[in-house]
Amino acid sequence: MQVAPSILSADFGRLNEEIKAICDGGCDLVHVDVMDGHFVPNLTIGPVVVNAVAKISTKPLDIHLMVENNTFFVELFAPLKPKYISFHIEEEKHPHRLIQKIRSYGISPALVLNPHTPPQSIEYLLEDVDMVLLMSVNPGFGGQKFIPSVIEKAKILKKLINEKNPNCLIEVDGGVGSSNIHLLKEAGVDVVVAGNYVFTNDSYKDAIKSLQI
Ligand code: DX5
Ligand code: ZN
């Protein structure tokens, strides 16, 4: 299981040290939550701060867009060369076109599904993406309670992925910790995002290791 700590739960006054600590702690990716105050009722960081994060991080960035104008934000963040840019299917009229655009920058495209969005809705896009992110909380905030129905959803998605594109990864984001990591693994999940669980632990390294099962 790959682990992508979400820096939304980091101490932004000490962002440099926080990024170094998760990278030295052995994380696989650094998860960056970009919120615009429109798609979700919260506002986070833009390219100035993410550029600073990219310079400090020794691990690839996983940028999760929670915004209304996806194309604008893809163009804004593409120069920072993240490994992944993921966008919400609920907010995109032309997902196939945007996937090709992300790939044209040499970045892996990923789709995000809110808790209510069925995996079947992206069946005909699966062969074009490298990862699908299933939200296990309502997007907008760290530290929320895990929504258990994501486990069944991951299993259904895994079947579709096996048929359409076995190389596509499944990522789960929200409320992940030691209490649900084994269920997620069993369901076929490849990558977990963890904010609160990692950043409230005395040892980020121990927290990360405990999820890398
Ligand atoms: C929520 C974000 C998540 C969040 C995860 O909208 O997408 O990445 O920060 O934080 P935890 O692990 O605390 O739920
Ligand atoms: Zn996220």
Image (tube, helix red, strand yellow):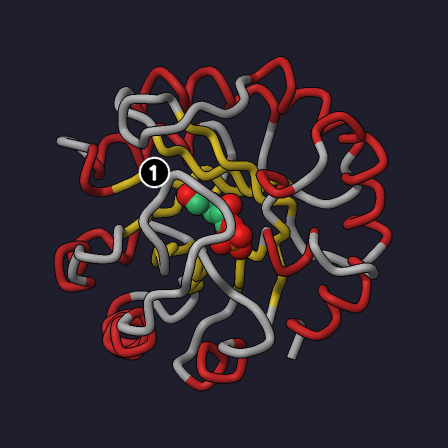
Is the residue 7 above or below the residue 49 in the image?
below
Which residue sits at x=19%, y=33%?
92
Badge 1 amino acid: Phe
Image side of residue 7 versus residue 139, left or right: right
Image side of residue 185 versus residue 194, left or right: left
- Quadrant placement of the C terminus: bottom right
- Is disc 1 placed on a helix, strand or loop? strand
Which residue sits at x=51%, y=23%?
78
Q: Where is residue 116 drawn, in percent x and y? A: 18, 57
Q: Which residue is mark 1?
A: 87
Is the residue 6 above or below the residue 80 in the image?
below
> Residue 79 falls in which quadrant of the image?
top right
> Residue 20 falls in which quadrant of the image?
top right
Q: Where is residue 180 drawn, in percent x and y? A: 49, 77
Q: Where is residue 75 drawn, in percent x and y? A: 43, 17
Is the residue 76 above or below the residue 5 in the image?
above
- Quadrant placement of the N terminus: bottom right
Say whether mark 1 is within 8 Å of ligand 2: no
Which residue sits at x=45%, y=39%?
64
Label 1 CA crowd tier, 10 Å (few <14, some 14–19, many 20+): many
Q: Where is residue 72 drawn, in percent x and y? A: 35, 15
Which residue sits at x=41%, y=55%?
131
